[in-house]
Amino acid sequence: MSRAGAIAVALFVLLGAARAEEAEAPSREPYQLVRTLHALQDEIARGNLEAHNAQPALLKRLGEEFQKADPAVWKDARNSRAVVTFLLSGGSPQVVGALRSRDLLSIDAAILDGAIAYVEGRTEDAKARLGGIHARDLSPTIAAEIALVQSALVAQSDAKAAIDRLDDARLLMPGTLVEEAALRREIFVAGQVDDFDKFEALVQKYFRRFRHSIYAGNFRQRLAVAVARFSFAQQSDRFPRLVALLDQLDAAGQRALYLLIARTALVRGKVEMADLAAERVLGLTEEGSGERERARFYRAAARVVTNAHEEALLDLQKIEIGRLPERDAELLRAALAVGRNVRKALPAAPAQQDQSGDAPTSMRPRIDFGRSHAAVKRAQVLLDESKAQLRERAR
């Protein structure tokens, strides 16, 4: 029987399709039931949509089985640990709370109470109970889940500690949905701390091991939005390595990401990066598309302050402003203003008699600080607008 077939049979039994026979069959221990849950989750990591859809019903049935189990079964530590796995996999905290209130479970109270606090959103309580626990000292059946929770609790305050815990989770349960989840989370933490080498290695590992995961599609979308926020996405020397990673995305995802990188780079003054990203979009789009028009604009706007100024200015003047989003239309007007003035000759200054009276001298034209200040202010508005857009897309 295939693995998927075995899981289907297990679900058939657990979901009550043969209740009459079930009454005569020997009952299964909670830890054995949770093994079925693990098998189901492994199928989810492999992309089995039916397994993903079946998980809520399986968790509900497990909760029912736990509630009517003989109290004596909880003296076995394996069964008590199974309750933690059940809870952290999406099982009912009410079921676990009821077992906890009856003082039936043979497990460290800090672990159990910390897990309950975490799923109920009581972050500080969860930190207080789980913060001092070393996941590697726990049983392998719950160690990885606890490490995953610990990483989430410190992700905002201590990125390095979060990465360490996620490394633990990955290594403790390789090839499972826990490793898949840990990889997804760690990729974004590594990007936030600008550890490009680790980010690159983890992305490659994720697509190599879990490209068919049920969650891979959502992961690609989040990656496309988040990567443009990371500082290494604005470093042109890393661009070839970034391209190799983003080749894992579909064409639509790549176009959206490179456009976002190009615009972000442009408003931050990273003209080389804006040029490179825009070129990638031009290679992924068809003539006449709106995305291609935006790419042409970003490329020209980046080049208008380079040695290719004259050609870039001509390209800017050919852009159809009506085909750009309003925020880009504003940026186009600013780019045209820069392009028309960036290399304009300084106005001739009237000659003024030297104090000695011997000969006239040319004086440097007075700088119009009012206009300069307005230009800087406008650039800041554009930058703030871009940052706000990135935050909105990341929600």
Image: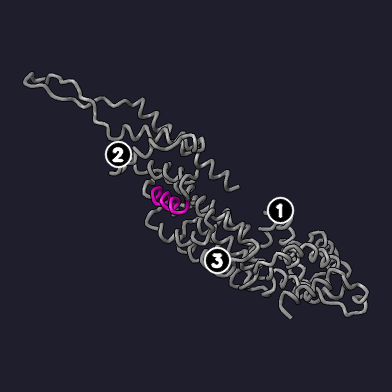
Under circle 1, the secondary element is loop
Q: Which residue is mark 3?
A: 207
Q: Is residue 301 left or right of residue 144?
A: left
Q: Residues within 10 Å of mark 2 (few under 14, many from 20)?
A: some
Image-quadrant location for residue 59 = bottom right
Q: Residues within 10 Å of mark 1 (few under 14, many from 20)?
A: few
Q: Is residue 372 left or right of residue 382?
A: left
Image-quadrant location for residue 218 = bottom right
- Report how far apart the C-alphas of labels 1 and 3 lie in the structure: 31 Å
Q: x%, y% of residue 46?
A: 65, 69
Q: Which mark is residue 121?
A: 1
Q: Residue 124 magenta-drawn?
A: no
Instruction: Tell me what residue is drawn at x 50 percent, y 54 percent.
Output: 254
Q: x%, y% of residue 213?
A: 63, 65
Q: Which residue is mark 2?
A: 310
Nearest the camera: 86 or 115?
86
Q: Earlier in the sequence, mark 1 or mark 3?
A: 1
Residue 98 versus residue 362 in the image, above or below:
below
Instruction: Tell me what residue is drawn at x 80 percent, y 71 percent.
Output: 11
Instruction: Tell me what residue is drawn at x 40 percent, y 28 percent.
Output: 374
